[in-house]
């Protein structure tokens, strides 16, 4: 359990001899997180004073490996690489305290492992503090991403910040954090509601014995032994630093369990199987890409090992068992990710030689674009790159016959270009959740096109979709469609007309 508590870094770390090259510092020097590390000027020998900043990353999801004092106003920061894999240095999340009011600093993150970044497009880190607990993005005018001569011309990220409240603890992160503990609290609260159409199962455990949760959302009649189950399988956070995927996933779940009429219809006809966190250890440890043992789990779907990749093994086994059982039809597999260089939401899909199969693959993204103004068909891409052979999308389509549609849903760490306005809008936590709700809605449109779900709610059918829709999960946020009015006003039938038989496919 060496990694259970992030290791602390001794103070001597700050005085590494200056002969160490950046390369050595990147590759070898940074192993654990800083722990309540007080940075004083090198010549200073007294007790720490107010304004001698104290850095900490020894908390869940924390990541900061080293701090160098450059001047009273300037600090170089080093990301701690993923556990057991030095190649990945992107995610950071740390706190700063013991500040003086109006203390101005420049923090420079000097050891990113990727140079191509949305920081070039204006992305900025997020910040919160004790008295302002909501994460916000830093203003772009205070953030610079550039090649730095002092760091062997590597790309570095500098941001200027003014601490305004002496007693506040400030936190900075690569993007809005979403921890394992937060997910557990969310699933616990969902369980306490006692909804008869929500079931939580323990599918397995990670290497460090964390829960691999499987959520099933469907009308209880669909879950009897006799019922034929039409399954939509969703997974997220195989890449632990891709926190936006969790906000999308929770937005989807919140919508599916709500009393919204579309959610009811979806539950009446479909069985949603959702694994919200495929890599709980990596999330806990503050990794960007890998598991505890340094594996990119999204390259191990072809032959997952039960001891090295237990969560992938358990997920794949559950899907194959379902696939082989007579009473389950898996229609969709969709794995949620976040993208570090592209904007908008978009999908990766597979390519097929058979044009009919290819067209089937194309339908869902086209419908998605109609529901979500931040979803981009331009960025959506179908491929069979060899380098992606170990991803869930690629490996599973090879195992299942072509009846299962396998996708990766990506969403930008930064922003989207709205289809309507043409302006660039940074994503908020709510913006990500909204994409999740629109994903849910798109399943309704898809199954109407397929005539699995009737266009008009049918009284007396399995559907209990009439009335009662308070639309609790649908409101808020800019853009997209307000489906509560759309469907309650009977626009459902016209939507069927658009996509119904006779080639009225979405553009
Ligand atoms: Zn990813």
Image: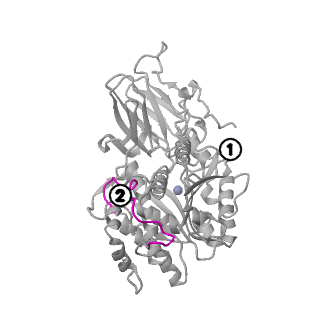
Which residue corresponds to the image point at 51% horizontal and 66% vertical from the top-left?
268
**Residue 3 shown left or right of residue 262 in the figure:** right
Residue position for label 1: 209
Residue 116 in picture, x, y percent from top left: 44, 54
Q: Within 10 Å of the Cα at label 2, are there few (<14), some (14-19), or many (20+) other Cα atoms?
A: many
Residue 261 at x, y = what percent?
A: 41, 63
Q: Nearer the viewer, residue 219 or 255?
A: 219
Does the magenta stretch mainly form a helix, a strand or a loop? loop
Mark 1 or mark 2: name the one nearer the start of the chain.
1
Q: Quadrant of the N terminus?
A: top right
| Range covered by the magenta-colored residues | 459-482
Res 81 visible: no
- Position above or below: 43 against 108: above
Q: Is residue 194 visible?
A: yes
In the image, what residue occupies the spot 60% across and 30% down?
Answer: 8
Q: Position of residue 78 (x, y in %)?
A: 50, 37
Instruction: Give the Cα distance between marks 1 and 2.
Output: 37 Å
Q: Is residue 461 above or below residue 115?
A: below
Residue 479 within the magenta-colored segment of the rendering: yes
Q: Which mark is residue 173?
A: none
- The disc placed on residue 416 is 2
């Amino acid at each position: 359990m060496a990694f259970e508590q992030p290791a602390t870094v001794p103070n001597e770390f700050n005085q590494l001899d200056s002969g160490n090259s950046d390369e050595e510092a990147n590759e070898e020097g940074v192993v654990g997180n800083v722990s309540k590390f007080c940075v004083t000027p090198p010549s200073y020998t007294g007790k720490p004073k107010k304004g001698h900043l104290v850095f900490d990353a020894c908390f869940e999801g924390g990541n900061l490996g080293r701090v160098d004092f450059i001047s009273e106003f300037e600090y170089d920061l080093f990301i701690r690489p993923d556990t057991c894999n030095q190649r990945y240095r992107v995610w950071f999340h740390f706190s700063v305290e013991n500040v003086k009011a109006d203390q101005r600093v420049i923090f420079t993150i000097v050891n990113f492992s990727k140079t191509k970044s949305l920081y070039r497009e204006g992305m900025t880190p997020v910040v919160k503090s004790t008295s302002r607990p909501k994460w916000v993005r830093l203003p772009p005018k205070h953030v610079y991403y550039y090649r730095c001569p002092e760091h062997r011309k590597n790309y570095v990220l500098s941001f200027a910040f003014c601490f305004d409240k002496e007693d506040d603890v400030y936190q900075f992160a690569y993007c809005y954090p979403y921890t394992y503990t937060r997910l557990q609290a969310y699933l616990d609260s969902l369980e306490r509601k006692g909804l008869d159409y929500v079931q939580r199962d323990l599918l397995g455990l990670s290497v460090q014995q964390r829960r691999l949760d499987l959520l099933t959302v469907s009308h209880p009649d669909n879950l009897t032994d006799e019922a034929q189950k039409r399954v939509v399988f969703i997974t997220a956070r195989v890449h632990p630093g891709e926190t936006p995927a969790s906000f999308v996933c929770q937005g989807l779940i919140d919508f599916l369990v709500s009393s919204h009429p579309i959610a009811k219809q979806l539950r009446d006809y479909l069985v949603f199987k959702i694994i919200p966190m495929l890599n709980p250890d990596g999330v806990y440890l503050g990794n960007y890409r890998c598991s505890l043992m340094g594996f990119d789990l999204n390259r191990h779907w072809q032959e997952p090992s039960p001891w090295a990749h237990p969560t992938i093994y358990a997920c794949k086994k559950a899907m194959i068992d379902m696939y082989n059982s007579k009473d389950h039809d898996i229609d969709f597999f969709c794995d949620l990710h976040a993208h570090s260089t592209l904007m908008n939401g978009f999908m990766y899909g597979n390519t097929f030689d058979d044009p009919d199969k290819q067209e089937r693959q194309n339908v869902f993204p086209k419908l998605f674009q109609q529901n979500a103004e931040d979803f981009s068909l331009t960025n959506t891409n179908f491929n069979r790159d060899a380098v992606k052979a170990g991803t869930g999308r690629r490996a599973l389509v090879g195992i299942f016959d072509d009846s299962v549609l396998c996708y990766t849903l990506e969403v930008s760490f930064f922003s989207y270009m709205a289809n309507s306005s043409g302006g660039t809008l940074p994503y908020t936590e709510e913006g990500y959740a909204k994409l999740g709700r629109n994903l849910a809605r798109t399943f309704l449109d898809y199954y109407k096109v397929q005539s699995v779900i009737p266009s008009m709610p049918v009284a007396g059918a399995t559907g209990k979709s009439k009335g009662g829709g308070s639309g609790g999960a649908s409101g808020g946020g800019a853009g997209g469609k307000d489906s509560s009015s759309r469907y309650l006003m009977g626009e459902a039938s016209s939507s069927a007309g658009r996509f119904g038989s006779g080639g009225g496919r979405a553009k």
